[in-house]
Amino acid sequence: MKTVIMNFSGVYPEEDFYRQKAGDYEMVDFTHAEGVNCYCTSEAEQEIKERIRAYGPCGIHFLDSGNYHYLSKFWMEMIDTPFSLLLFDNHTDMQESAFFGLLSCGSWVREAMLSNPLLKSVCIIGPKEADFQRDIPSKQVTWVSAEDLQEGRLQKFREFLEGESCPLYLSVDKDILRGRDAVTNWDQGEMKLDCLLGLIEEAAAARKCIGGDICGENPPESGFCENRELHINSQTNERLKEVMAKVMVNSTNNSNSYQKDLHGELYACIIKNKLQMSKFVEQEKGI
């Protein structure tokens, strides 16, 4: 199972985290795609989905900068078993779409919750508490704020992991990290890379992981990238990929094996969350 690199901005050819094991990666070129930067048109969405369909949701996917974080939604739509999303991000990505209803990097989590019946629960780690208070419309989302992280308050994260048995899809935006560990084109948090890796490993110890993605590159300005920034991001990408690869469900375990191994527990997960997520959808639609 190859790691997929989705190259939109042209930044990945400037990085080197994948070069020593180039056979383990497959780069898909989207540099000529239109209607994709921050927002995604319906035409672009159809093209992207067609080009990534053959890869399936398992494994690791690099998504370019945070401008393209909405790609997580497309990968999750290929999962055919009930699952939970665990998102590490400096932003909630749960705002209402602000541009003619188009899917965006700031609205994709909300859109996924409303449209994907197999997405049973969401945990977001990293944004400021004020952002959660503004963007999270209901209690169906577990959140751990930047302030919680600074104080070591991780109880909600652990309750999320222990409360269900649905496998996880992991999504990491490197803008959650401090400047020493990542350089992005969005405002960043203060989390250390070692802390992030530790939380990923803790999550994987509690639940199986179907797949995951990584974004947060710093796109080249006028075709130029700072070598220091490229080095920092390449090192972080390599470490994230190494840890996430260890926790991914083996590619030979397809969705049928998930359901066989976890049938009873997943059924309980579905029953437990169906009513809650239905209430969320009703609330969003004003029912």
Image (cartoon, rainbow, N blue to C red):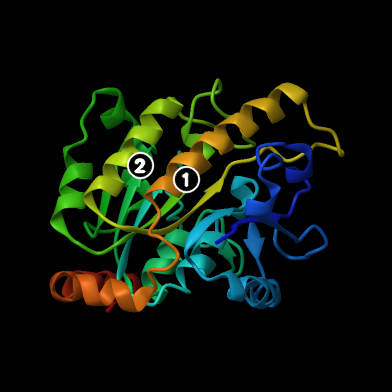
Query: Does label 1 or label 2 sit earlier along the sequence?
Result: 1
Most foreground residue, 138 or 153? 153
* Residue 207 to residue 195: above or below: below
Most foreground residue, 33 or 5? 5
* Residue 27 to residue 102: above or below: above
Give the side of residue 184 with respect to residue 34, left or right: left
Of the residues shown, which amino acid type is indicated by label 1? Val
Question: Would residue 238 be seen by someone viewing this image from the given angle?
Answer: yes
- Mark 1 or 2: in front is 2
Residue occupying the point 46% across, 35% down: 176
Give the side of residue 247 with respect to residue 174, left or right: left
For residue 151, what is the image quadrant? top left
Give the labeled residue for mark 2.
200
Residue 59 lies, in percent from the top left, at: 49, 58
Residue occupying the point 45% across, 28% down: 193
Give the side of residue 254 with respect to residue 3, left or right: left
Residue 264 lies, in percent from the top left, at: 13, 75
Residue occupying the point 73% across, 37% down: 15
Give the labeled residue for mark 1.
172
* Residue 188 to residue 4: above or below: above
Residue 3 lies, in percent from the top left, at: 59, 55
For residue 211, what is the image quadrant? bottom left
Quick check: marks 1 and 2 in contact, CB under 8 Å?
Answer: yes
Residue occupying the point 58% across, 69% down: 55
Question: Would residue 183 be seen by someone viewing this image from the given angle?
Answer: no
Q: Give the SS element for disc 1.
A: strand
Residue 243 lies, in percent from the top left, at: 44, 40
Q: Give the SS element for disc 2.
A: helix
Of the residues shown, which amino acid type is indicated by label 2? Ile
Which quadrant is home to the N terminus? bottom right
